[in-house]
Image (cartoon, rainbow, N blue to C red):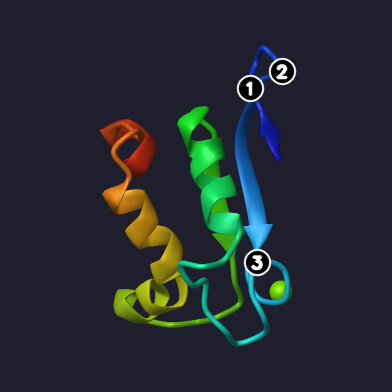
Amino acid sequence: MALGRRGKIRLVTFDGDVTLYDDGSSLTPDNAVVSRILSLLKRDIRIGIVTAAGYTEASKYYGRLKGLLDAVNKDQQLTADQKTD
Ligand SMILES: [Mg+2]
């Protein structure tokens, strides 16, 4: 968690495997963390997800995080900045 100058939370990072989802598994749309992460994004809090997976292809990260990435993409309340920052 990182705080800005006024003590406001600016960034929250999560471990992926064994924390957000089972070891070697993926973040699926039915995962309860999806709506919670969307709530943080709507408060202008940036999200980081840390993994030791060493893929060289972006598509493999997309596959692992598809449930969250698709939810962010289709959410109609998030601003463009909140989706991309
Ligand atoms: Mg882990």
Q: Secondary structure at mark 2?
A: loop
Looking at the image, tell me whether mark 3 or mark 2 is earlier in sequence order.
Answer: 2
Residue at 60 percent of width and 38 percent of height: 11
Residue 17: percent from the left, percent from the top?
A: 66, 76
Mark 1 vs mark 3: in front: 3
Q: Which residue is mark 2?
A: 7
Residue 20 versus residue 55 in the image, above or below: above
Q: Secondary structure at mark 3?
A: loop
Q: Amino acid at mark 2?
A: Gly
Residue 46: percent from the left, percent from the top?
A: 51, 39
Q: Residue furthest front?
A: 30
Front position in the image: 72 or 60 = 72
Q: Which residue is mark 1?
A: 4
Q: For the residue carrying disc 2, how many other residues have a C-alpha within 10 Å: few (<14), some (14-19), or many (20+)? A: few
Q: What mark, if any, has residue 20 been given in the picture?
A: 3
Front position in the image: 23 or 10 = 23
Residue 21: percent from the left, percent from the top?
A: 64, 74
Q: CA distance from mark 2 to mark 1?
A: 5 Å
Residue 30 versus residue 26 in the image, above or below: above
Q: Residue furthest bottom?
A: 24
Residue 73 versus residue 81 in the image, above or below: below
